[in-house]
Image: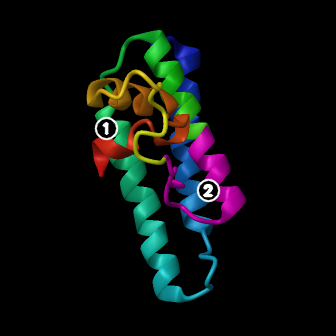
Amino acid sequence: MTPVTRQEVLGLYRKIFRIAKKWQSASGQIEETTKEKEYIKNEAKTLFRKNKNVTDPKLIKECIEECEARIEIGLHYNIPYPRPIHLPPMGLAHKHSHTLRHQEKLRKMSKPIYLKSHDEVS
């Protein structure tokens, strides 16, 4: 990891914890705010620790983009949890290709960047 990339990653990590410190839930309830703050901290710790040994620059860039996307979406919608996607079953398969394996491949390719690591952690 280059020093610039390292600084960028550490900056994102600090930014997430600053956001968690100032976080206010949409409902305004103290219990909900506390729960969401803990979720933000735990999610950040888990994902950053999971990816700490990543050395491929392309993969590091994808992780940074996912992190930035999740931060922006969380701040915009005021929810710390990843936004779900709704794809109809077999909605992506071609007319002549209804194999399950092909459908799973299409679903994986259509997954938004902010959800790339969500299924691996949850």
Residue extending farthest front: 96
- Please provide percent x and percent y for residue 50: 29, 35
**Mark 2 vs mark 1, CA separation in Å:** 21 Å
Residue 99 coordinates in the image, percent (x, y):
29, 27
Residue depicted at x 53% and y 41%: 114
Tell whether 14 sits left or right of 120.
Answer: right
Query: Which disc number belongs to residue 25?
Result: none
Give the residue pinned by disc 2: 74
Instruction: Find residue 55 and report its image quarter.
Output: top left
Camera-side residue of 25 and 106? 106
Q: Is residue 118 above or below residue 97?
A: below
| Residue for badge 1 | 49
Q: Position of residue 8 (x, y in %)?
A: 58, 28
The range drawn in magenta is 69-87
Using the image as rendered, state which of residue 64 and residue 85 is in the foreground: 85
Name the residue rendered at 59%, 56% in the picture: 18
